[in-house]
Image: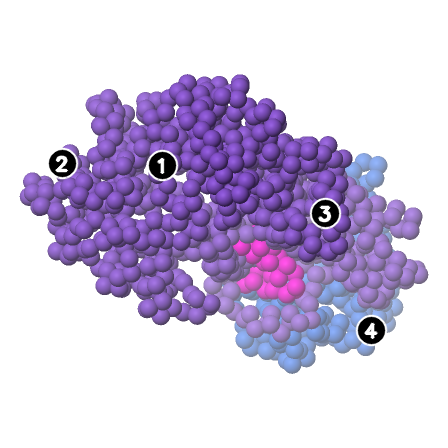
Chain colours: A purple, B blue
Amino acid sequence: MNSLSQLSRRYLKKQWKRTLFTSLGIVMATALFTGLALLFTSFINMYIETESEETGRWHYHVSGLTMDQARQLQANIRIDESELIASSSQMAKLDGRSSLHDEPSWLLLRDVNEMGSGLTPYPMTLLEGRMPENTSEIALNVASLTFFPDLKLNQTVELALQDVQSTETGSIQTKTYTVTGITEWTDTYLPGPVFYALTVLDEADKNLAEVYLTVKASTDFETSLIAALSDVIPALSEAQSDSDRDSLIQGMKYTAFEKDSVWANLSTIRVGTHDPLLRFLGQSSYGETNQGLIRFFALLAGIIMVSVIFVIRNSFAMSVSERTTEYGLLRVVGGSPSQIRRLVLQDAVQMALIGIPMGLLAGVVAMKITLGYVSGLGLPEVMHLKLIVSSWPLIVAAVLSLLSIMLAALSPALKAGKLSPMEAVRRTGVYTVRGKSSRKLVKHKQTYRKLLGITGFLAGRSIHRDRRRFRITTLSIIVSAVLFLAAGGISFQFSKQLLHYSTEKTDFRLTVAAERPGFASEDLALIDQLLGDEEMASQRVQYGQFAQPLLHDPSVFSTQLIEFMKKTSTINGQPLTDEQALDMIADQTMHVQILLADRPFLDSLGLPDVDELWAQMQKGKVILSQTNALSASNLSFQTIPFTRLTKGDTIHLDHIREYDQQTGSPIDRPGLPVEYGIAEELTQPPWFLEGFFSGGGSIVLIADRQYLMPFFDDHPEISQATIVEEKLAVDAAEGSEPAVYKLLEPFTHERNPGVSGSIRISNYYEEMQNARGVVQMLNIFVFGFAAVIVLICIMNILNTITTNVLLRRRELAMLQAVGMSRTQVRRMLLMECTLYGVNGAVWGSVIGTVLLFLLGRSIEGTLGNMTLQAMPWLLILCTLAGALLIAILAGIWPIRRVMKDEIVEAIRAQE
Amino acid sequence: MIDIRNLVKTYGKTDAAVHALRGVDLQVASGEFVAIIGPSGSGKSTLLHLIGGVDRPTSGSIVVEDQELTQLSEKQLSLYRRRRIGFVFQYYNLVPVLTVEENIALPLMLDGLEPDKIWFEELLTRLNLQDKRTSLPNQLSGGQQQRTAMARALIHRPALVLADEPTGNLDSQNGREIMALLRDTVRRVGQTLLLITHDANIAAQADRIMVIEDGRIRPMQLASNLVRT
């Protein structure tokens, strides 16, 4: 073995160029694997960080404990961090509007001194004022302010407290608190409609305890938790079976609302699992590990592995064919087949030893740079994306590389072992025609000659002399072309999708939720006035808006929409009937947006005969604007009308729709008794319309605000249930968007989201910027990976073409000896490269395009609308040109090298 | 036909220089058949390569059909090789991807010409290659390959045929056949034939035998006389 490895080392040194190429391939492959593994861990880390920040770092939430139990649990050896929430069983029932819940809402008094480390979901922030310092002070959650209209700081509130622990209603105690602060705290995860309020509790009042905790690192978090709980709750340790245990601690997913009463939730011992976080820690109790992510990365790793094995195998195959005589000689002097095999594998091991460490380093450095750049884009989506270098990604990458290399070297090694000594020694070094290629070759008659002259003819013959080698060379080009095309197509599609909002001209939209139309619109008018003739915010329009559902009405939806639905959807793999398509459309209930317009609004639409139209609108007529549905037929974006409605039609919208907040099911209630007669139809949606790019399309009716007002006034129950928003859309001048945002921002106060009177700002400009950033990031990753694989393939092409040329030195010399000029030789070789390129490029483009279609199909629905909307001609053209260029460039070096050969030297070399 | 004066060819420089030819003078008349013999490394092949225009001399002059080869450009040299010379190598040197027909027609194809049909057929018949027209070199025996190479050297009726041990790689039966074919064809067309060989029997068929030794050439008078008598 020692002498073998010496022999191997000597050969690698002698053939240093090929060794360098192959090693470079190995370095890049390892770097790719490393990059991928690091990206995976970094992404997982990002998800964990993001999830922790958004919903807390806790793993489990145990409720229904006594204070003693809770404190014991906190002190348990298996528990790492924990936070105790001590609450009083005296809860305040809240009066006031709550149309969405049949159950009453409650205020749960939490002890401020038991506030912990921010382990809990939705860390609390103090918006105004200060924290309570004694038992008669309270800090209210901003979300509960709806129940305390017009409340100011330092005012007192009277709470009707009742002990929910005692049976029935119990005695009600009234207690007065001074409001010292307003906190922001999303209590979504609390069971039932309950809001936290912070106060100082007497020790005697602390009779409800919950603990948010993390368990210490272990292989199975859940087992640790149950063990810890068993220490605290004797009944649990006595439980014999899983079902006994389950009846004692009920697992619950934190994503679902529970319908039990508040008390039932708080008094029973329950364990909540922070599944979104645990999933990324590999500790999900529901088996839903991050399979999607793993599958995606595994797919990428698979692609890399296949390309890498293919390239490296090729390189070894070349070296074996070059060393055939040497192996033959070794066999003649007594080398065994297994020794020859080991010789080839030795080469592989030696190159792996050099290539893998370098690749690991290169991968880490490349990822560091890439992620550094990506985080520089400042995208909120990947705020927590940073490079995490740990040992296992590096080990995985090294193992994958080594595995690829050894697999790649295996078949050339086996082949070398099988060489018969005679065959090997007899070879005269002529790069001859391979057996099976002969018949096909002769058929290649004269087409090339007529088309491309004698050099083209010879080139055409030459490339087909060895079908396997031809396939290897073209396949490298095909793989490159396919990858480039797929990467380009994916990125193109994503950008198109993400950046489609760019057709929306609105940069900012200020929205005020109003209880009835017209309410609070003055604020917006004021802002509008303040902006005045500011050139930066050149286009502005103010309007009111509310929505009503367009219920199941077959006569309204357009046939095109029904056809589109049938084309794009299936039920259990079966095509839809008209009826089903209609049901599906109705299910996705499209809302009709009704815009409340004033005269300046109408003027801004730039319609002819505005006076006449306005007169009609004052009598209740409306303007229809259909933002179209998107159709993917004919491989292009196509907008199709959403309904059959047109000028002259009348539409009744006699319902309003609400959704039950607990079950999510729709509740339909009677709507305004208005008949909307369509006086005009807009061909283009106006610039400020929301959701222009909504795949399903929508209908907008523009009505006179003053005409609709009385209907709201006459039906207070409807006007209370209908959310009317007043909006001011602003289109800022190019480049001055940040300045305009600065002007608008102070007017908005999001203190009371969803509460009337507060102005909300939608920053579409920033969304667009973010979308561009995301596209850029996607491009970096998609093209980055594709580029490295393409680079590996280029090396393969270079390797193959070089060998193809260099193996034929004698043949080329002889062609010159019988009178072929150097120019002709050069032209012939370049032509060969071109033919390789054309072959690979054409096949690559065809396969790549098909793959792109299939890829689009397969991820349609899961990753959004990814259907290839149009033939990416430019991309295909680039791919074609690129592949051709690569093939020709790959030929330049070997051609220059053989052109330096003296004819006589090459001839003599064999004689 | 050929007029070589004081031809010197040295490979390498100074200390390591190999003097392949040290002032060779040789005149060959048109239509003459000259055999060149000599031990390995004596410079036979070098001389042939220089006359064939695949190599350039260090000094001296080579005039073939009134053309001074040393003054030809690379391009002119390839035209010279293509049109004036027919080369037959010991190792056949056929283009592996071309059929027998195409290999034979190669020198003409390089000029964009088609071979003279009658002559082409005659060559195929004489060399007994009619059945092998569409075969590739790897489907031929050694003798058939050499016959193809010969046909390629003769197809454009070059004035000068250079053969470098054409029978060196063949068994004696095949060798004799090839030689007879070569000699006959050359005679018939009136071509000049310059042949390198180790085989005294083959050399004996020549009009004149030259011996190269240590880079110097001299006629092999005695041997020639012996054979003739």
Label 1 secondary element: loop
User: Can see residue A718?
Assistant: yes
In the depicted structure, whether residue A894 falls above or below residue A579: above
Give the Cα distance between marks 4 and 1.
115 Å
Task: State the image coordinates of residue A266 (x, y, percent, origin top left).
Answer: 57, 41
Residue span colored magenta? A456-482
Give the Cα distance between marks 2 and 4.
109 Å
The label number, if any, that marks residue A236 in the structure image:
3
Q: Earlier in the sequence, mark 1 or mark 3?
A: 1
Task: State the image coordinates of residue A830 (x, y, percent, origin top left).
Answer: 56, 52
Label 2 secondary element: helix
In the depicted structure, whether residue A148 falls above or below residue A342: above
The residue lying toward the viewer, choosing from B12 and A327, is A327
According to the picture, the residue beneath numbered tag 1 turns out to be A96
Give the Cα distance between marks 2 and 3.
71 Å
Report the amino acid beneath label 1: Gly
